[in-house]
Structures are given as structure tokens and as C-alpha cells.
Image (cartoon, rainbow, N blue to C red):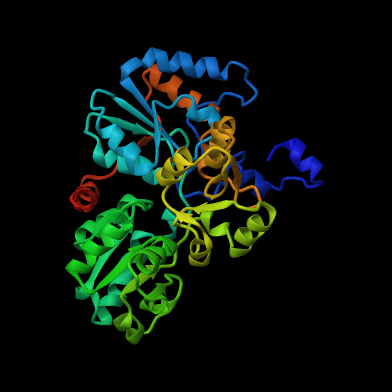
């Protein structure tokens, strides 16, 4: 939201709002927010030229990845764009690139480090660019959950399936316990595989993707799903509930997709007759049930590419992408709006701005490795095992 917009709405951005927009720092962040050097001023008129010059100086030594949710000012310098897993695989396919600059969030950079060679260095321009969903499941919490499952006598029946949007520690836990990773595109295939290995699934860390896949795509009942809350004793569940459940859903969610509501869907249908509602499967179950189409980020993009001219769409995903798609397809007469009336950027994605990208590129061009993301070897081995199980899915 711009200053002009806030003035027009007669509101002033609070410190929290500025943090969510990526314009302030959170000193409590476990990953830290300080850069070892001075960031260029956001008002510097030469930022674009400086980024271009540093990137040209680095040449083939650098490969810049841009997640779909990044700001336009950053996306313009990306060599490839995509979702988190596609970008990690793209990085692995460029072994000649010494530096992988990942314009995304922390778990994505970890995945890139896991899949690239030891000679490649993954750089995250701002270490404060984390993921609220990934941070909702820590290694300690998940280990405690496994103890609860063991005490209930069901652990041997449980196969963990972890969403790509998770930390390297959680991916390693998944690999260590015979599970697999999934994306929003292949969650159904991952669950089908998991139920061939065991009777129950522990789905981490996004409850909504797990529930929507189990109920909407696989025909399970809502009663087959229970939610494990790591902040309650025994996850807030009885041993009997754990024994009866097929899907044990971790109590995590995406702070962006979790904002969309059934009211959002009803409101946009009333405002725009004939609108197609297209949402990400990280949305709540009632939102997904009320939508016309549901799919991953890549699915959303392809659906709009194939949409007929003059069609109307309300999209339930991150605002940077929706706005970019609206501009892209406007010449074709496609009307594309954000599903909710409230501005809803991904706050941590927005932390990577042009000053941070310029600082990272110029540092690398000067021979200084900054914000290097490294996963320890044991964690990497088990996380890679879980990722390889996903890659082997039919």
C-alpha cells in the first residue's frame, strides 16, 4: 500500500504494518535482519543500473532465481522465475553458476543448497526473509509429536509427508522416518504413495493443503482428519483420536492464503457476475470448496494463459503475482482481480527488495560472499532422501 493510498483511506501505517510490508526490521527474528555493510538507500535513482552492472560483471558466475511472489523491481533481474521447487531444480541444472542468488525465502534457499553441488554457494539477499508457515513446525516440536504418536501406539503406522514449504530440519525428519516431500502440485500422488507404505499420514506443516488434498482430491471425510497443535499437551489430542485418524494434520498455515474467507468468495461473486474464482490449495477448506478452480501457483498461471479473452477471474493467492498477472493479461481483455479487498502481500517475500539485491550482487562482484545459506551434511543427506522419494513418485 502506497503512502498516497493510506492517506486516501485516512489510515497511517503502524510499525507492525511497515514490518509486514517489508519496510522495517524485526529485532526478534531468529534469522537476524542485519546486513554486514550499508544497504543502498531505497531512494537511490541508480539502483537498477547498479544491479545490472553488478550482474553483468559476475556474468555466468551468478544465477538469479525469482519466486513468483517477489516484487516486480526484483523479478526483473531474475534469470528464471517459478515456484520454490522449480527454482531449486533450475539451480541444480546450472552447475557452472558459482553463486545462486535466491530471491525468495529461507526454506527455498535451503532446498537449493540441498540440491546443488558443494561448489555452488546459495545466497539469500535478506536473512530475515523467512516463511511463517515453515516456522510453525520446529524440529523440537516435531520430535515431540513423534513421541506422542509412539506413546499412542501408532507411530509405526504413520508415514510423514512434508510440504516443500518446510525447513531443512523438517525435510530431514521426513526422510529419516521413511516419508516424502510434496508440492501443491503433487500432494495427491504423495499421499497415495504414503498410504501404500502405512495406515496414517502425519502432514507437515500446512493443515489446509493436507486437508484439501485428503478430502477434496482423495474422497476422505473431514472426520478422518485431526489437527495436532504443538502448543498443547499431546497436541490437544487423545490416544483414541490418534488411533482413529487417517490424516494427522500439523496446525500450520500460510499467513497469506489463510486470510481468504468464504465471505471473500461470496462478495466477489456479488460484485462481478460471471467471475471465475481460482484459489491456491493452501486456502481454508471452505474457500477451496466454494471456488471454481483450485491449483498451485504454476496451475494458476497456466489457467489464466488458457482462459478466453474477456473472461473474469478472482484469484486467491499472493498479491504481487495477482497484480503481475492482471497487467500481463489486460491487453487480452481478461479481468483479473484479487480475491480479497484487503491488501495482502507475503510479508517475508517482500523483505527482498532492490536495495538488498543490489547489496548482495555488488558484494559478490567484489569477491565477498554474503548471506551464505548452508545446510549441514547430516540434515542435507536425510532431506535429500525425502526429496528423492518425491522425485521418484509415478
Residue 9, compared with residue 133, is above or below; it is: above
Q: Position of residue 168 (x, y in %)?
A: 31, 50
Q: Position of residue 268 (x, y in %)?
A: 64, 55
- Specify the quadrant of the image occupied by residue 232: bottom left
Q: Residue at x 19, y 74 (%)?
A: 156
Q: Position of residue 312 (x, y in %)?
A: 58, 45
Q: Nearer the viewer, residue 372 or 113?
A: 113
Q: Position of residue 151 (x, y in %)?
A: 27, 81
Residue 173 is at least partly visible in this image: no
Q: Quadrant of the N terminus?
A: top right
- Specify the quadrant of the image occupied by residue 99: top left
Residue 69, compared with residue 198, is above or below; it is: above
Q: Nearer the viewer, residue 301 or 140?
A: 301
Q: Residue at x 75, y 40 (%)?
A: 5
- Does residue 11 appear to the left or right of 197 in the view shown? right
Q: Residue furthest bottom?
A: 240
Q: Residue at x 28, y 24 (%)?
A: 97
Residue 331 is at least partly visible in this image: yes
Q: Residue at x 39, y 42 (%)?
A: 83
Residue 315, compared with residue 210, is above or below; it is: above
Amino acid at each position: 500500500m502506497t503512502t498516497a493510498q493510506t492517506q486516501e483511506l485516512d489510515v497511517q501505517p503502524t510499525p507492525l504494518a511497515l514490518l509486514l510490508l517489508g519496510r522495517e526490521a524485526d529485532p526478534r527474528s531468529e534469522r537476524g535482519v542485519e546486513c554486514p555493510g550499508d544497504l543502498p538507500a531505497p531512494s537511490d535513482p541508480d539502483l537498477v543500473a547498479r544491479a545490472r552492472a553488478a550482474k553483468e560483471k559476475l556474468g555466468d558466475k551468478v544465477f538469479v532465481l525469482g519466486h513468483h511472489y517477489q516484487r516486480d523491481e526484483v523479478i526483473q533481474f531474475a534469470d528464471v522465475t517459478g515456484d520454490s521447487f522449480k527454482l531449486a531444480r533450475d539451480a541444480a541444472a546450472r552447475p557452472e553458476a558459482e553463486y545462486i542468488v535466491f530471491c525468495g525465502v529461507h526454506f527455498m534457499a535451503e532446498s537449493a543448497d540441498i540440491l546443488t553441488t558443494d561448489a555452488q554457494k546459495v545466497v539469500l539477499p535478506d536473512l530475515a526473509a523467512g516463511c511463517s508457515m515453515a516456522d510453525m513446525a520446529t524440529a523440537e516440536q516435531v520430535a515431540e509429536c513423534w513421541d506422542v504418536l509412539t506413546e499412542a501406539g501408532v507411530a509405526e503406522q504413520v508415514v510423514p509427508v512434508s510440504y516443500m514449504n518446510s525447513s531443512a530440519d523438517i525435510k530431514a525428519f521426513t526422510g529419516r522416518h521413511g516419508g516424502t516431500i510434496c508440492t501443491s502440485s503433487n500432494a495427491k500422488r504423495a499421499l497415495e504413495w504414503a498410504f501404500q507404505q502405512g495406515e496414517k499420514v502425519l502432514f507437515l506443516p500446512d493443515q489446509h493443503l493436507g486437508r484439501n488434498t485428503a478430502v477434496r482430491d482423495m474422497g476422505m471425510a473431514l472426520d478422518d482428519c485431526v489437527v495436532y497443535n504443538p502448543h498443547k499437551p499431546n497436541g490437544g489430542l487423545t490416544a483414541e483420536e490418534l488411533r482413529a485418524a487417517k490424516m494427522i494434520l500439523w496446525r500450520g498455515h500460510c499467513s497469506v492464503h489463510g486470510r481468504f474467507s468464504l465471505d471473500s468468495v461470496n462478495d466477489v461473486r456479488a460484485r462481478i457476475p460471471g467471475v471465475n474464482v481460482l484459489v491456491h490449495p493452501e486456502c481454508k477448506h471452505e474457500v477451496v470448496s466454494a471456488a471454481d478452480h483450485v491449483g498451485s501457483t504454476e496451475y494458476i498461471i497456466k489457467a489464466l494463459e488458457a482462459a478466453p479473452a474477456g473472461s473474469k477471474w478472482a484469484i486467491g493467492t499472493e498479491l504481487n503475482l495477482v497484480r503481475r498477472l492482471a497487467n500481463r493479461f489486460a491487453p487480452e481483455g481478461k479481468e483479473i482481480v484479487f480475491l480479497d479487498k484487503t491488501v495482502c502481500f507475503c510479508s517475508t517475500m517482500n523483505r527482498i527488495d532492490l536495495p538488498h539485491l543490489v547489496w548482495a550482487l555488488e558484494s559478490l562482484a567484489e569477491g565477498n560472499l554474503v548471506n551464505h545459506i548452508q545446510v549441514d551434511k547430516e540434515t542435507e543427506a536425510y532431506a535429500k532422501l525425502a526429496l528423492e522419494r518425491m522425485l521418484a513418485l509415478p
